[in-house]
């Protein structure tokens, strides 16, 4: 189960051995999935790009992005389904994030750009508004934002907030997210009378029906074309949490986080891997059911997400997850060193690249062929 950035690719260029490794796994019917904390695009779009860059034909059937598990939140079988609720989504391009959310099944999606176009006074500073947000497609708000004198039931209510990938305009997003965290029941423009009430649990903060806040990953850094790692969504999350702590006098921000290293994402990934594996074996061998999955090798470049997630995860099916760290991405001996690989960040094996990782996994599984 390899990651992508830092394991298979450096930006648009394949890491040596990456394409050959994937083709070998495909040719020998060895099941794998691609699990990434990246996002901001439809799975089909990202898979098409990866197929072209790696010169390997890939499929959405074994591909999981950081926000792919959000699909679960619109399940018709769930009494808490958000399919018909109004949600705020943001990311590097909130218009694209809206498209993804609607593809997943969210029917009522609002973006920061929608709000800014309808109410420019929500954010008083012009440059980013004009240069970034106005280039995105805005839609009319389903209801106006609350202002004094309006009835709440006539105003826009947000039921959940989603950060799909690394936001471009931190300032605007932090403002709007904080507005909603301090609101009454998710009505933008309101301020809950419970905020700061020390007689209430948590001094009343986030205690008045405010919308749940979802982040799709917590990577502080990620590997890009620059020679040093760059901030990821985890840095934005830390900024939101820091502002919230300052506003509330020290209270911790309550939020839900997907992506690596969080258990829910690994559980989702295991389900996807099992489904793909069953289909692969059914097509390749004619077997109706596959034997239980014994081992998964998580190949990653980031000890704090890939390695910690695999080490922490306890499979309900008893599958043994083994972490393998490559030297081609975020972690290098010069950045953190071997002494940083301790505890939950300590991989089962450190290798130079994904090709060596696959070879090591095959050896552990008793593979008799040559690669």
Image: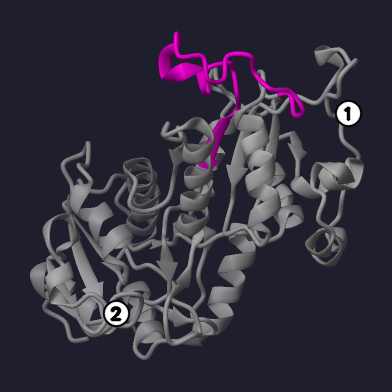
Measured as percent of width and height from the top left, residue 290 is found at 26, 48
What residue is rendered at 54% in x and 75% in y? 50
Q: Which residues are magenta?
A: 187-214
Question: 87 and 268: which one is in front?
Answer: 87
Measured as percent of width and height from the top left, residue 360 is found at 15, 76
Would you say 306 lies left or right of 246 here?
A: left
What residue is rendered at 29% in x and 75% in y? 331
User: Does 327 appear in magenta?
Assistant: no
Q: Are marks 2 and 1 in contact (CB under 8 Å)?
A: no
Q: Quadrant of residue 126?
A: bottom right
What residue is rendered at 86% in x and 12% in y? 151
Q: Is residue 366 visible?
A: no
Element at label 2: helix
Would you say 113 lies left or right of 103 here?
A: right
Mark 2 burial class by Cα count in 10 Å: few <14, some 14-19, many 20+: many
Question: 88 and 33: which one is in front?
Answer: 88
Which badge, 2 or 1, comes first in the chain's sequence?
A: 1
Would you say 217 lies left or right of 316 here?
A: right
Measured as percent of width and height from the top left, residue 317 is found at 21, 39
Which label number is shown at residue 354? 2
Q: Quadrant of residue 200?
A: top left
Camera-near label (2 vs 1) is: 1
Q: Quadrant of residue 150?
A: top right
User: Does 188 appear in magenta?
Assistant: yes
Q: Is residue 357 above or below residue 68?
A: below
Q: Most extreme residue toward the top, as rendered? A: 199
Measured as percent of width and height from the top left, residue 237 is found at 49, 50
Q: Is residue 362 above or below residue 345?
A: below
Mark 1 burial class by Cα count in 10 Å: few <14, some 14-19, many 20+: some
Which label number is shown at residue 144? 1
């Amino acid at each position: 189960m390899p990651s992508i950035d830092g394991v298979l690719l450096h930006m648009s260029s394949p890491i040596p051995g990456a394409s050959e490794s994937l083709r070998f796994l495909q040719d020998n019917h060895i099941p794998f999935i691609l699990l990434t904390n990246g996002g901001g695009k439809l799975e089909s779009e990202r898979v098409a790009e990866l197929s072209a860059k790696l010169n390997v034909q890939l499929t959405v059937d074994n591909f999981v992005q950081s926000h792919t598990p959000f699909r679960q939140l619109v399940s018709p079988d769930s009494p808490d389904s958000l399919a018909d609720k109004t949600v705020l989504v943001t990311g590097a391009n909130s218009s694209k994030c809206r498209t993804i959310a609607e593809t997943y099944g969210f029917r009522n999606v609002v973006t920061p750009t929608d709000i800014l176009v309808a109410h420019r006074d929500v954010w008083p500073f012009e440059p980013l508004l004009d240069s970034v947000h106005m280039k995105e497609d805005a839609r009319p708000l389903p209801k106006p934002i609350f202002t004094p004198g309006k009835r709440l039931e006539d105003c826009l209510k947000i039921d959940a907030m989603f950060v799909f990938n690394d936001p471009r305009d931190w300032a605007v997003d932090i403002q709007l997210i904080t507005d909603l965290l301090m609101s009454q029941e998710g009505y933008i423009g309101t301020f809950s009378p419970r905020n700061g009430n020390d007689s209430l649990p948590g001094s009343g903060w986030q205690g008045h029906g405010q919308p749940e806040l979802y982040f799709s990953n917590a990577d502080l850094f990620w590997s890009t074309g620059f020679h040093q790692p760059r901030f990821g969504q985890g840095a934005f999350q830390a900024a939101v949490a820091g502002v919230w702590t300052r506003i509330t006098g020290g209270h911790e921000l309550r939020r839900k986080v997907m992506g690596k290293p969080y258990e829910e994402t690994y559980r989702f990934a295991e389900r996807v891997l099992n489904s793909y594996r069953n289909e692969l074996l059914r097509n390749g061998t004619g077997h109706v059911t596959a034997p239980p999955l014994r081992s998964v090798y998580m190949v990653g470049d980031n000890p704090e997400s890939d390695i910690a997630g695999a080490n922490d995860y306890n499979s309900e099916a008893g599958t043994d997850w083994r972490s393998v760290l490559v030297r081609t991405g975020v972690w290098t001996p010069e950045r953190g060193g071997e002494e940083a690989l301790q505890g939950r960040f300590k991989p089962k094996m450190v290798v130079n690249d994904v090709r060596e990782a696959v070879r090591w996994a095959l050896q552990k599984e008793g593979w008799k062929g040559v690669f």
